[in-house]
Amino acid sequence: MSRKRSWAEPYKIKMVEPVFMTTLEDREKFIKEAGYNTFLLRSRDVYIDLLTDSGTSAMSDRQWAGIMMGDEAYAGSENFYHLESTIQDYYGYKFVVPTHQGRGAEHLISQILIKKGDFIPGNMYFTTTRLHQELAGGTFVDVIIDEAHDSESNFPFKGNIDLNKLENLIKEKGADKIPYVSIATTVNMAGGQPISMANLKEVRALTNKYDIKIVHDMTRVAENAYMIKLLEDGYADKPVAEIIKEICSLTDAATMSSKKDALVSIGGFLAINDEDVFAEARNLVVVYEGLHTYGGMAGRDMEALAIGITESVQDDHIRARVGQVRYLGEKLLDAGIPIVNPIGTHGIFIDAKKFLPHLSQDMFPAQTLAAEIYIDSGVRAMERGVVSAGRNKETGEHNYPNLELVRLTIPRRVYTQAHMDVIAESVQYVHERRDQINGLKMVFEPKYLRFFQARFEKL
Ligand code: F0G
């Protein structure tokens, strides 16, 4: 007879941070004061914080011990050398430039590689990545497979590049107008979807043919590697660490927001194989981030990051991390909540168009739904729809993405299964009374990355 064997997290809790429940009246007042934008809420008014998995993970006792070993020298900190060798060992890139977080690295590589009038194809945009490409004079072109824009498609590798779209772009614009292809592992805006190794190899072959680089946004590479292990032929018996190295070996440079996979609150880096590009980045980092041996990070932060990288690639860690997200996703699917399929690796993405079909995209359904979930239970989610997509830089019109999503992003090693149950019940309750929910109108719109600071009023 086969016995059921549940899995549990590969750690026990040594320190806790209290959180507080508020009243419904309080939350109605707080969200109104925040302009119905969950980014503008105070954290103390949030019960379960699913705004992001960025910088919100729990560090291990080893990482905290590393904090005490910070070598806060302005130049040549011991922790930098530890970080540099860890990145070389675990990811295989040759050269490392530390930055304060992911967008610092995006800024450097965009300024170095992109010329005015260039095109940068990618597997869907990310907000900061695309903005840095545009600020450097480039135009982002989405060449992800069509399935990625369809929340119902169950295709397992929705992060894949459509090779026809990519090759047509190269032929239309000319290879000299395409400095690199931008590949994210996993694709955040598609719902935390992985790219397959087979697809990445094909992209490598195609870019080699035209002598085009690949820049890898490796923010959630361990999660992507785990999905390859689960789903792709030939990888079931390979350690996640080995799969990560193989992914990195197919690319020329990488930007990293260490605030996700790598289990720290702040930090990032640019990793590069080309010595000339490295020389430029090492010089430019001094202007925007700090000296090339700290790049905006304290020594202690670099130490915690080096240790976090080694923990992030462990199979038992990543299985529990992705497993917890899937637990929540399956609960929501069982309750009939429309979410992006398949379940992503860092969060659950609710399809707000299907959840609130009576609201047009001009009424900001995802923004509305995130506010309603907060009002119901103090769970803070994030809009990933028309507000995040911003405006077309030529016409000034809203970009209307197919995917109008609310992201319930799960921090690593922070919440328990009981928290997941509370979240699922709240979403279910809001779903039951969805007919009574009205939309929002935007009353303040900042120029850059408007989703962070835009304000709304109820219609
Ligand atoms: N690339 C991806 C795929 C990201 O998800 C992020 C950040 C960045 C780059 C930028 O890194 O924040 O360190 O400057 N994503 C966060 C999120 C903000 O909530 O998804 P950063």
Image (tube, helix red, strand yellow):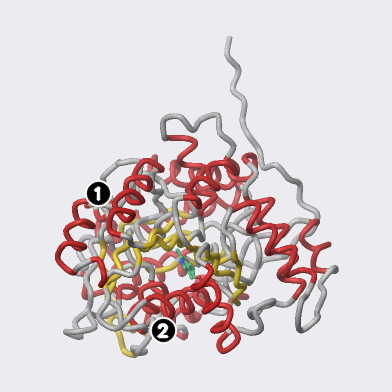
Q: Which residue is mark 2?
A: 35
Report which quarter residue 395 is drawn in.
bottom left
Location of residue 231 with respect to 191 vertically, above or below: above
Distance, label 2 to label 1, CA atoms, is: 34 Å
Question: Label 1's element?
Answer: helix
Q: Nearer the viewer, mark 2 or mark 1?
A: 1
Residue 321: tell me if it is visible.
Answer: yes
Nearer to me, 68 or 23 = 68
Disc 1 crowd rating (10 Å Cα; few below 14, some 14-19, many 20+) is: some
| Kind of residue at badge 1 | Glu
Image position of 324 with respect to 15: above or below: above
| Residue for badge 1 | 147
Task: Identify the residue at image location x=21%, y=70%.
Answer: 400
Residue 255 image position (x, y, % from top left): 50, 66
Q: Residue furthest top?
A: 1
Quadrant location of the C terminus in the rendered image: bottom left
Q: Secondary structure at mark 2?
A: loop
- Residue at horizontal 23 percent and vertical 57 percent from the top: 166
Q: Earlier in the sequence, mark 2 or mark 1?
A: 2
Image side of residue 77 versus residue 85, left or right: right
Q: In x, y percent, where is residue 33?
A: 46, 86
Using the rendered view, name the quadrant where residue 115 is placed: bottom left
